[in-house]
Amino acid sequence: MDDWTIDIGKAGAASEKGLCDRCLGRLFGKLGTGMTNVQRGQLIRDALRENGIPSEPPEACPLCGNVFDSLELFAEAAAASLTDVGSDNFLIGTRIDQETASKEKELWAELGTENAEAIKTELNREIGKLVFCMIDRAVDFKNPQVVACVDTQFADVTLDIAPIFIYGRYNKLSREIPQTIWPCRVCKGKGCPRCRGVGKMYVTSVQEIIGDIAVEMSSGKTHALHGMGREDIDALMLGTGRPFVLEVSEPRMRNIDLAELERRANLSDLAKFNSLSFVTREKVQWTKDLAPTKTYKIRVRADGKVNKERVNEVARSIRNLCIDQRTPVRVEHRRADLVRKREILWVEADWIDDGTFDLTLETGSGTYVKEFVSGDGGRSDPCFSGILGVQCRVETLDVLAVNDGKVDK
């Protein structure tokens, strides 16, 4: 044990409260190392006796109520709950009655102690040590996969299970499904005649195709999909796919077979998935914050006469073109009405027939491509239609690439 000294006056005042060895020792818990609070309390009593101050432990502690006599019971309850959940590590938390918490704060204030350890801290540690021996899993104080919170009044245990995060890429092969679940606009997800009781605008989504399977495999509760941007419902996502992170809440099995998840999800004809891997929560923000350029292929129809040479000429002229885009009419009901600076890096044209052609183009993140083509009634300026001198409209749109550098870490 390290050498340590205590304030005999404070120790004597604390002893007069009739505290048990644990509670007495815990009042000086930050002094000295290599000993338990019980040992610390016993040493304090010895020091008091040497100074002529009688000090004996009580049969019933007025502060903790002898709650530490139930450590084994608490540990067994926590271990039983944790055994039902697959995890590599765990952490113990406790909930104590409000009266005990209040008494502890009042005692600290009365004694003016600066080196006390909270009763919850000791309970967490002592229960955790017992549970560790029972379930043989690591304790993780920083990023626990599951926290078992013990209610010390009733020995009930509630589990706080950390989500799992799965990174990957998806291809959307249907022009009739959204990226994520789209609640019904009428009932807000409750179910109504408009949505035929399902609470959604669309029968399924990219999120549900893989998320429902992941929830089943992990015995989880819910899922959320965090994409690196999103494409319109009527657009396809091709190429190597769009990066995303799938979040599954309260998984009772964490180490699911991602190859099997990918195989089952890819049975769908509406979307495909690749490059699945487990990641940490930080990957969600990384995915949302990255602002990659995107490559599109769009089928365009001109509403007036135009020839192949003119279309090619206009396409070749657009290089690193800066444009102003006001929030499009089609999304102004859910987006702030702002004018945003965007960039068109390059455009290539492929003539199809009279008045119809394909444009392949790369744009900066957040560009409204349909509006760049049409002009959106002057909201997108300059626009392809304006430069061409003929009003054009997009018939189909495909995302060929999300140019994120494929930094899949």
Image (spheres, rainbow, N blue to C red):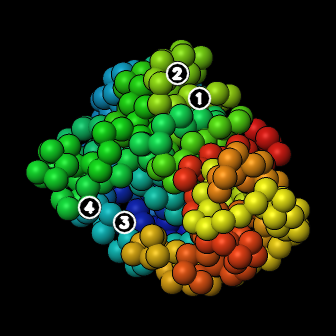
Work out how far the residue at label 1 is from the one at label 2, CA to CA, in angstroms: 6 Å
Give yes or no for contact between labels 1 and 2 (Cβ–Cβ under 8 Å): yes
Label 3 or label 4, whichever comes before in sequence order: 3
318 or 198: nearer the eye?
318
Give yes or no for contact between labels 1 and 4 (Cβ–Cβ under 8 Å): no
Is disc 3 placed on a helix, strand or loop?
A: helix
Work out how far the residue at label 2 is from the one at label 4, CA to CA, in angstroms: 29 Å
Label 2 or label 4, whichever comes before in sequence order: 4
Quadrant containing the C terminus is top right
Label 1 or label 3, whichever comes before in sequence order: 3
Work out how far the residue at label 1 is from the one at label 3, CA to CA, in angstroms: 55 Å
358 or 99: nearer the eye?
358
358 or 160: nearer the eye?
358
- Residue with the mark numbered 2: 266
Work out how far the residue at label 1 is from the one at label 4, CA to CA, in angstroms: 29 Å
The amino acid type found where label 1 is placed reads Phe
- Residue with the mark numbered 1: 273
The amino acid type found where label 4 is placed reads Arg
The label shown at residue 321 is: none
Label 2 or label 3, whichever comes before in sequence order: 3
- Residue with the mark numbered 4: 185
Residue 119 seen:
yes
36 or 349: nearer the eye?
349
The amino acid type found where label 3 is placed reads Glu
| Badge 2 density bin: few <14, some 14–19, many ≥20, Cα 10 Å | some
The amino acid type found where label 2 is placed reads Asn
Location of residue 270 with respect to 356 vertically, above or below: above
Quadrant containing the N terminus is top right
- Residue with the mark numbered 3: 104
Q: Residue at x 61, y 68 (%)?
A: 304
